[in-house]
Image (cartoon, helix red, strand yellow):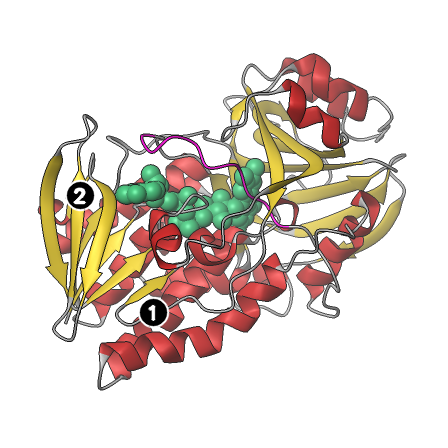
Amino acid sequence: MKAVIIGCGIGGLTIALMLRQRGIECELYDQANVQSGPDVGINLVPRAGRELVQLGLLGQLDNEALQTRESVYVDSMGRELRRNAPGAEARFEYPQFSLRRGRLLKLLSTAVQARLGSSCIHFGHQLRSFTQDERGVTAYFFDGHGSHCRTASGDILIGADGLHSSVRALLFPHNDGLRFTGRVVWCGMHHWPTFLTGRSMLIAAASASKLQLYPIAEGPLKGQYLTNWSVLADVGRAWEERREAGPARPGVLDDVMPYVRHFSIPYCNASALIQATRELWEYPLYERVPLLQWSHGRVTLLGDAAHAAYPAISNGASRAILGARCLADKLADAEHPRHALFMYEQECLPKGRRVSTGSTADHTPVTNSLLWHSSQRSDTQKPSNVVRFLRPRSNASESRSS
Ligand SMILES: Cc1cc2nc3c(=O)[nH]c(=O)nc-3n(C[C@H](O)[C@H](O)[C@H](O)COP(=O)(O)OP(=O)(O)OC[C@H]3O[C@@H](n4cnc5c(N)ncnc54)[C@H](O)[C@@H]3O)c2cc1C
């Protein structure tokens, strides 16, 4: 069996490694010329970490990532509401990894090239169309000038092409209405003095904003870590009207500071950290009606293409990795590729919908999303209603962004 994978993001690279492990051939295609996009922090829940460890990547992760020991939920004054011990520190056998997104992509693509050969990855190839019949799928790729540059065929096609998935748009052309939720996430990273255990994720909520801080790498000085921060704020729907719609864009300090100043956390001066950050990013949050199916014939969706998740719960990449595991297992076990895709959808779609279920009418308040985040971590409750994170479709030559 051979798979054609669209997208060299976390989902695409991970499924390639898993297919290789199961003796299934694959090729990867990405429209970007190089791996790029905002290099902000990302953290992987223990179940996703386990999948990467089982791919033999523990050494690489240990070199690049910090293992997060606890998540501490506080109010805007730093008063503790709850404390969870994730990963190896708690009931999980595997740790929760926190690292730079760019480093995670790099270690995954290095492993793919080492195990599958460098010729299996094709950058600068944008999927624009595909056909399928009883014998297989055929995908058509175009270069940055819009010229057809390659035709690839395989038994299945996996659309791991992110939030603005072309595969999704081709499969489900009517599922593309985006609506700005009135919320924005700003994020960045900077070297900063250690706080709490030095491996703590801090999540603080105020009435209209939520702040998240966690270390992602050792710093150049003792007692310092490269610290990732993000601020989720209710900015109102008018916000997007004064912006050009698009993917992640450079953030403006004056925009984010009003949502940060009312946090007064004794052991970490978040305002000073954010003011010291050289490069910050702004992600507007959009919603879209969740899909009722991900597969059609020999074509399926994986990761953000299937189920974009609300970024504040740190779940999108983890779900892409867990989805990749399920899909790889089904492909290895099923008698026919179409049956495998059906089985994958049956198992993963309900979980994907739980992280991406949206309502256009009723949004969970920011403060409640703190509680939801907390409950997701402890697996004790499920959200009744959350918004999803999506950006408007930008032009087709858009390079990778998270
Ligand atoms: C601010 C922020 C913080 C986040 N933090 C976390 C976190 O802490 N933990 C977590 O688990 N998740 C987090 N996420 C979510 C996570 O980044 C995404 O869920 C994850 O990167 C999705 O991976 P993917 O492989 O599905 O898609 P992507 O990483 O978006 O990759 C898609 C790839 O497809 C390519 N592509 C697109 N269209 C085409 C085409 N037509 N032809 C060829 N190639 C194409 C793109 O160039 C890109 O490389 C965060 C997201 C944001 C925005």
Q: Is mark 2 within 8 Å of ligand 1?
A: yes
Residue at the spot 61% in from the left edge and 33% down from the top edge: 284
Q: Amino acid at mark 1?
A: His
401 left or right of 186 in image: left
Question: What is the x, y in percent for residue 170?
Answer: 34, 53
Residue 63 visible here = no
Q: Is 34 rendered above or below residue 311?
A: above
Question: What is the x, y in percent for residue 15?
Answer: 31, 60
Dominant SS of magenta comes to loop
The residue that mark 1 highlights is: 296
Stretch of the chain drawn in magenta: 388-397
Disc 2 crowd rating (10 Å Cα; few below 14, some 14-19, many 20+) is many
The image quarter containing residue 330 is bottom left
Residue at the spot 50% in from the left edge and 70% down from the top edge: 349
Question: What is the x, y in percent for residue 400?
Answer: 37, 35
51 left or right of 286 in image: left
**Secondary structure at numbered mark 1:** loop
The residue that mark 2 highlights is: 141
The quadrant of the rendering that contains the N terminus is: bottom left
